[in-house]
Amino acid sequence: MRIETEARAVAKFDLKPLIPAFGMEVRGLDLMDVSADTLFPDIRALFEEHSALLFRGQDLAPEKHLELAQLFGPIEDRQADERKPGEAFTIPEVSNVTEDGTTAGEMDLKTLNLKSNFLWHADSTFLPVPALSNILVARIVPTEGGATELASTRAAWAEMPEELKARIKGRGIWHRYSHSRKKISEELAKLPMFAKWPDQHWASVWPNPVNRREALYIASHAFQVDGYDESESETLLAELTEFCTQPRYVYSHRWEVGDVLLWDQRAVMHRGTPWPYDQPRKLSSICSSARESDGLAAIRMTPELA
């Protein structure tokens, strides 16, 4: 069935691998034409199989960006508790542009938070419900730098030496938002926005419920692995991240305005890269939360498993 579904998609669109290990550029598709019944089933099938999809030269309106994200799942809203009654959700931005239109200085907390995103991570592993997908849309891009890099933890897991696999397989991992921020700045980590949620405990491997392919589920937010102390955990997590981010598993995307990049948070880590901070960079970003149908039960750690 999966092969038949992808064959239909190939017939409709021009597909080009991002790199041999994973990912597809989808050509000949206007995301403004996507609806639940039209084109999205093909996009979802490609998403399950290839983990990352690139659509170049799109003119994706904000309301359509939101609609597309809702097709993947409930919209993640980290500011829900801060919003006034009746105040509408606004699409998050990954940007160094301040409210007055200037750019944030390199040591401003806003920029330091962006630098935290230069660490390899999956989004929202620190939330009670983690993310399934992220859809990034390029609105303003710098003249150099500012790439987004994706690493397939599914392709890496499939090729990982058994000795390394054995050290993590079957174990749970604890995640904390402030942990990744503390790696960049103690001051940043102390901000209330990074302490809203209790530590989260997820299994180290997330199997895809559609094709049963497994992926290592780690992030810069991870701070302890079951059965190891924090120092041992840090060493192991660093080894795993290093293996998963070898060049053969990494796609680096140099943005152009109108590019849309989406990926499977269950099977892909990502990071930003530096750019001249006096130049504006703005990406619109919407994460969709995972649902039970996306395999949440497989990574949920019960007290008996901890």
Image (tube, helix red, strand yellow):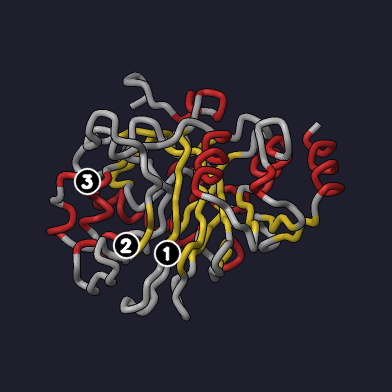
The CA distance from mark 3 to mark 1 is: 19 Å
Q: Mark 2: give few (<14), some (14-19) or many (20+) Cα within 10 Å.
A: many
Q: Position of residue 76 (x, y in %)?
A: 40, 37
**Does residue 286 appear anywhere in the picture?**
yes
Q: Which numbered marker is on residue 272?
A: 1
Q: Which residue is mark 3?
A: 194
Q: Secondary structure at mark 3?
A: helix
Q: Which numbered marker is on residue 114?
A: 2
Q: For the residue marked with disc 2, what is the amino acid? A: Leu
Q: Position of residue 197 (x, y in %)?
A: 24, 35
Q: Residue at x 84, y 36 (%)?
A: 4
Q: For the residue marked with disc 3, what is the amino acid? A: Phe
Q: For the residue marked with disc 1, what is the amino acid? A: Gly
Using the rendered view, name the quadrant where residue 89 is placed. top left
Using the rendered view, name the quadrant where residue 252 is placed. bottom right
Q: Is residue 281 left or right of residue 103?
A: right
The CA distance from mark 3 to mark 2 is: 14 Å
Q: Are marks 1 and 2 in contact (CB under 8 Å)?
A: yes
Q: Secondary structure at mark 2?
A: helix
